[in-house]
Image: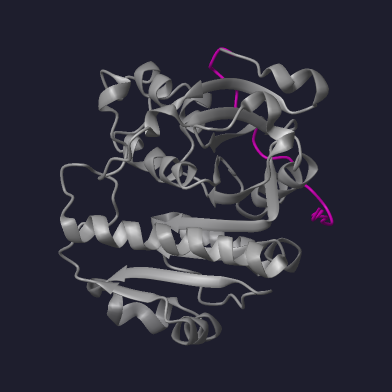
């Protein structure tokens, strides 16, 4: 087990949770994890009014049969500030026996948590089906996806890692195989995470999907990187990517330049094209295969 320690804390602004606890995991009796809700993706989509039926739920711009059966557990991961995270499990996982599994983890920084909006009494944004769709895709690939509400950049990530490392077995996590998927503005969260040696040692793969890394970072540890950005951003490449990270991308061959006219982010169903679907699929497969390869090396 990797244990994250840090010097000093400060209290983040506490958000008042506005939602009602709908269900409690049967496993809670033997755990101090605060399970706020358990539901399937189909149930969540209907509850939030994101679709009319679980059968038509299409969070990403391509459909995976059975994705509406992905299990979602909402947890409170910091008692001091009411920070929450939505944890997505593959449909085949029994939430009552999580301690019997050990699956790779893909973390989605701020912006992907449905509970983040509920905690403030706000409706989910119009692109929320696409945002949670990323997490759904990885759950269908056999990973555990963690969509978190970190609130405060560095402190929030430390609190999240403290929670995950403190409940590794209870949540069925394999913390020797952690990936971070960063899109758009969440690139700064990923940059902060890999800039701390005590956190970076637990991370094996980072995907910057149209998200600029911090140019001042020097990646710690044995981390694989994958970067996707449009041609419209190419001129800014050397301004936004640190030299150390740029060199790693060149060596690994995991830098993908996309035609700026291709709507490749995958947030909306209406704008997808065969090319954009393929871009998303390749990035997802890279993350999955990289984490699987890490398990092979560990064995």
Residue 224: image location, x then y, percent = 55, 72
Residue 138: image location, x then y, percent = 46, 47
Residue under the point 29% across and 62% down: 279
Residue 144: image location, x then y, percent = 57, 43
Which residue is at the front of the view, 176 or 219? 176
Which residue is at the front of the view, 79 or 59? 59
* Rendered image quadrant of residue 52: top left
16 within the magenta span: yes
Q: Which residues are magenta?
A: 1-21
* Rendered image quadrant of residue 54: top left
Residue under the point 41% across and 81% down: 239
Whether 50 is drawn above or below 173: the answer is above
Residue under the point 80% across and 26% down: 31
Query: Magenta span: helix, strand or loop, mainly?
Result: loop
Q: How many discs appear?
A: 0
243 within the magenta span: no
Regarding residue 81, the answer to whether it shows in the image is no
Side (left or right) of 7 relative to 72 = right
Which residue is at the front of the view, 138 or 206? 138
Regarding residue 135, the answer to whether it shows in the image is yes
């Amino acid at each position: 087990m990797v244990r994250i320690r840090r010097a000093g804390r400060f209290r983040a602004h506490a958000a008042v949770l506005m939602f009602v606890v709908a269900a409690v995991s049967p496993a809670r009796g033997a755990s101090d994890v605060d399970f706020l809700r358990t539901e399937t993706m189909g149930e969540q989509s209907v509850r939030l009014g994101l679709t009319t039926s679980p059968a038509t739920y299409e969070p990403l711009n391509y459909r995976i049969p059975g994705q509406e059966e992905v299990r979602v557990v909402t947890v409170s991961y910091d008692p001091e500030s009411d920070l929450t995270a939505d944890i997505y499990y593959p449909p085949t996982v029994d939430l009552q026996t999580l301690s019997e599994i050990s699956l790779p983890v893909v973390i989605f920084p701020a912006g992907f948590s449905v509970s983040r909006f509920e905690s403030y009494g706000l409706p989910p944004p119009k692109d929320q089906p696409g945002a949670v769709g990323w997490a759904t895709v990885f759950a269908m690939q056999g990973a555990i996806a963690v969509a978190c509400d970190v609130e405060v950049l560095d402190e929030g990530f430390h609190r999240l890692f403290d929670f995950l490392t403190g409940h590794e077995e209870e949540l069925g996590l394999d913390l020797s195989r952690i990936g971070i998927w960063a899109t758009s503005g969440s690139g700064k969260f990923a940059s902060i995470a890999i800039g701390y040696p005590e956190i970076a040692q637990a991370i094996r793969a980072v995907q910057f999907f149209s998200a600029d890394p911090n140019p001042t970072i020097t990646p710690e540890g044995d981390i694989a990187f994958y970067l996707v950005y449009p041609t419209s951003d190419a001129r800014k490449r050397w301004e936004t990517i640190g030299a150390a990270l740029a060199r790693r991308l060149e060596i690994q061959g995991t830098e993908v330049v996309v035609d700026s006219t291709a709507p490749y982010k995958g947030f909306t169903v209406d704008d997808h094209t065969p090319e954009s679907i393929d871009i998303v699929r390749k990035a997802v497969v890279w993350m999955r295969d990289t984490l699987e390869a890490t398990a092979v090396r560990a064995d």
